[in-house]
């Protein structure tokens, strides 16, 4: 923890990009330990890609740590470069977000903008990391070489309410690259995933393939999902999907990145996920 705190303390104050997930919760906790709490501000971006239930947890974590928390409304879909869902979609999102947070930090006198990127993120396909580096965002977990497993261990040690929270990327990650993202499609996914979580499913992704919803759940939840297929299918159809499928491989982080390695012009057999 001391190494992490030493990466933030010299800045004197910090504005933390805070989603409420375990990574950003730990980053916020580090800032609250390294600095006087009145010198730390947690900022959550609320938009169509953010599940409503996540905001409640973010507020709980900020209150637990005793730091000020501000929610800002953002409109990622107003940017056509983002809405078209190119392979570098996350770059446009993070570039806008970190620019706005940087301006807020300067306006209110915060010494730096902090995010919760961890060391394992650097080896994954994450275009948003380029935006963070360009805009001088401080990523203490990544800089200290702290990976996903250690993040959870530290969060549990600190008693953070989100320490065992399943990973949850923004809802735009549910769409294959090149498929336009709209508020209506995001609402479909949000409704479907909120329903499944209300049923007790822990690790959930509803991938949006047009009329098809491809459901990913944790491998240990596959049997239950199949047993409850009629109820799940009925609810997801009510959300607007025509067909509902269950991915037999189970949840896999970034599963839609699998198509990135395909070479243009190479003949491919049609794949039904």
Image (spheres, rainbow, N blue to C red):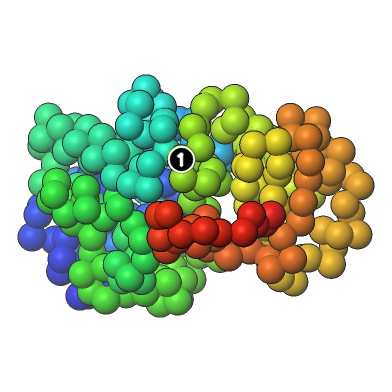
Q: Looking at this view, is 55 or 68 the one in front? A: 55
State the image quarter where residue 27 is shown: bottom left
Q: Position of residue 51 (x, y in %)?
A: 56, 39
Residue drawn at (69%, 50%) of the image: 214
Q: Quadrant of the N terminus?
A: bottom left
Q: Position of residue 15 (x, y in %)?
A: 23, 44
Residue drawn at (27%, 76%) of the image: 145
Report whether residue 170 is seen: no
Can you say whether 33 is above or below 54 in the image?
below
Can you say whether 199 is above or below 261 in the image?
above
Q: Give the residue at mark 1.
A: 178
Q: Looking at this view, is 75 or 145 the one in front? A: 75
Q: Position of residue 55 (x, y in %)?
A: 51, 39
Q: Is residue 57 left or right of residue 228?
A: left
Q: Looking at this view, is 16 or 215 the one in front? A: 215
Q: Is residue 59 left or right of residue 217?
A: left
């Amino acid at each position: 923890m001391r190494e992490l705190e030493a990466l933030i303390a010299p800045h004197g104050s910090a504005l933390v990009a805070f989603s409420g997930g375990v990574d950003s919760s730990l980053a916020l906790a580090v800032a609250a330990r390294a600095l006087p709490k009145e010198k730390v501000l947690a900022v959550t971006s609320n938009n169509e890609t953010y599940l409503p239930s996540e905001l409640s947890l973010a507020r709980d974590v900020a209150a637990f740590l005793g730091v000020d928390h501000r929610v800002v409304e953002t409109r990622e879909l107003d940017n056509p470069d983002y809405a078209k869902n190119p392979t570098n979609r996350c770059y446009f999102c993070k570039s806008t977000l970190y620019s706005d947070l940087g301006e807020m930090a300067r306006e209110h006198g915060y010494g730096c903008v902090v995010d919760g990127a961890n060391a394992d993120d650097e080896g994954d396909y994450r275009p948003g990391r380029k935006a963070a580096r360009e805009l001088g965002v401080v990523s203490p977990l990544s800089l200290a070489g702290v990976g996903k497993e250690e993040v959870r261990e530290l969060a549990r040690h600190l008693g953070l309410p989100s320490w065992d929270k399943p990973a949850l990327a923004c809802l735009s990650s549910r769409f294959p690259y090149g498929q336009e993202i709209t508020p209506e499609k995001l609402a479909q996914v949000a409704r479907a995933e909120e329903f499944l979580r209300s049923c007790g499913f822990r690790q959930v992704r509803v991938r949006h393939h047009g009329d098809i919803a491809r459901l990913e759940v944790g491998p240990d939840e596959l049997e239950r999902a199949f047993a409850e297929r009629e109820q799940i299918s009925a609810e997801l159809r009510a959300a607007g999907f025509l067909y509902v499928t269950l991915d037999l491989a189970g949840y896999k982080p970034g599963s839609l990145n699998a198509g990135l390695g395909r070479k243009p012009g190479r003949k491919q057999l049609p794949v039904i996920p």
